[in-house]
Structures are given as C-alpha cells and as structure tokens.
C-alpha cells in the first residue's frame, strides 16, 4: 500500500495538469473568504512549480511571480466585479 500525503497527491496532480491548479486558485480567489485554503493551495503550487529547494513556509510576491512564470502565467491585479459595476454606474 502506497501511503502518500494529500500534499504529495495534489503536487503530482498539479504537475500533470497545471490548468487544474489554476482553476482551483481562481475558485478560491473568487470566494475570497478562506485564507487557510489559499495558503495550502499556494504551498502545494509552490512545491509543484516553484524553485527547487526553496523553503515552502512563506511565499512573497516575487516567489509567487516566479512560480506563475514557471507555469506560463503572470500575476495581474484587476478591478473586482463590484468595483467594475460601481465604475459603470458612476
């Protein structure tokens, strides 16, 4: 029997299907209320796509940007839906 941790399973799945990792990240960011879940996912994504040998305990903006670059993505800040709606009615 192969006992692997949840993190190991998710890391392997993210490497096999980076789009799945992106979907999960977007879902959590859209919900916006579970910081613990976000930290776990970012830790797993960092292990899957981050710099090898980098500590996984903290992630700063530059390590997030590097991880996303590795995935062929970029970090982007955009107005929220609420903000866009408010600007449209102004």
Image: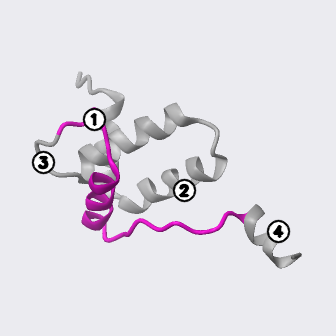
- Identify the colour scheme used: one colour
- With 79 as the anchor, is 6 left or right in this view? left
Q: As rendered, which of 76 and 53 lies closer to the eye? A: 76
Which stretch appears magenta? 55-81
How far apart marks 4 and 3 lie (CA) works out to 43 Å
Q: Do the residues labelled 2 and 4 touch (CB within 8 Å)?
A: no
User: Where's residue 58, x and y in %?
Assistant: 30, 37
Question: Which numbered disc flags the more N-terminal residue, 2 or 4?
Answer: 2
Give yes or no for residue 29 being in the magenta stretch.
Answer: no
| 86 relative position to 58: left or right | right
Task: State yes or no: residue 58 in magenta.
Answer: yes
Mark carried by residue 52: 3
Q: Where is residue 75 in the image (x, y as percent from the top left)?
A: 41, 65
* Disc 4: which residue: 86
Q: Which of marks 1 and 4 is nearer the N terminus?
A: 1
Q: How far apart are marks 2 and 1 (CA)?
A: 21 Å
Q: Nearer the viewer, mark 2 or mark 4?
A: 4
Q: Report crowding for label 4: few under 14, some 14 to 19, many 20 or more residues within 10 A (C-alpha).
A: few
Would you name the residue on which mark 2 appears? 26
């Amino acid at each position: 029997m192969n006992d692997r941790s949840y993190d190991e399973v998710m890391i392997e799945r993210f490497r096999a299907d980076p789009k799945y990792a992106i979907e999960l990240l977007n879902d959590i960011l859209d919900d916006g209320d579970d910081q613990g879940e976000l930290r776990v996912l970012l830790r797993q994504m960092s292990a899957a796509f981050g710099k090898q040998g980098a500590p996984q305990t903290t992630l700063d903006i530059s390590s997030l940007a590097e991880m996303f670059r590795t995935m062929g993505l970029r970090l982007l800040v955009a107005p929220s839906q609420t903000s866009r709606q408010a600007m449209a009615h102004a």
